[in-house]
Amino acid sequence: MEHTTKNQIFLKKGELLEITSRSVITVNSGLVWVTVAGDQKDYVLKSGEKLEITGAKPVIEAIRSSDIQVQEPGSKYKLFKLILEWNADVFN
């Protein structure tokens, strides 16, 4: 993934998180269960493991309290919009 957005997320045991795009999920600590729409296989990730999601709408459940990082592909449009907003702030 060239341009990415990284989000560090803390999940308590039993909490669910749905992601809306393809991503790379890295477990910094804890234990999570991941299921992906259209994928017949489920995944259990422990501390230090990562999973690249190429399908749609993964759902993550914390089996134990977990610290995870979700890295999503960035949008060129988002970057362009940020540059335009920065220019407006600086030069106006």
Image (cartoon, grey):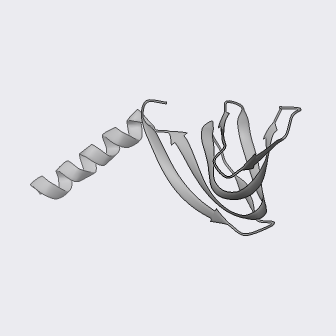
- Residue 88, image x and y in percent? 19, 52
Which residue is at a point 39% across and 34% down the rendered structure image? Answer: 76
Residue situated in front as seen by the camera: 86 or 50: 50
Q: Is residue 9 left or right of residue 73?
A: right
- Identify whether 18 is placed above or below 2: below
So how many labels did they put on this image?
Answer: 0
Furthest-right residue in this view:
40
- Residue 40, image x and y in percent? 89, 32
- Identify whether 70 is placed above or below 75: below
Residue situated in front as seen by the camera: 65 or 61: 65
Residue situated in front as seen by the camera: 57 or 67: 67
- Identify whether 65 is placed above or below 42: below
Which residue is at a point 75% across and 52% down the rendered structure image? Answer: 60
- Residue 68, image x and y in percent? 62, 55
Which residue is at a point 22% across and 52% down the rendered structure image? Answer: 86
Q: Is residue 89 left or right of residue 19?
A: left
Q: Is residue 69 left or right of residue 88?
A: right
Furthest-left residue in this view:
91
- Identify whether 79 is placed above or below 90: above
Furthest-bottom residue in this view:
12
Q: Is residue 52 left or right of residue 83?
A: right
| Picture quarter with the C terminus | bottom left
Which residue is at a point 33% across and 44% down the rendered structure image? Answer: 81
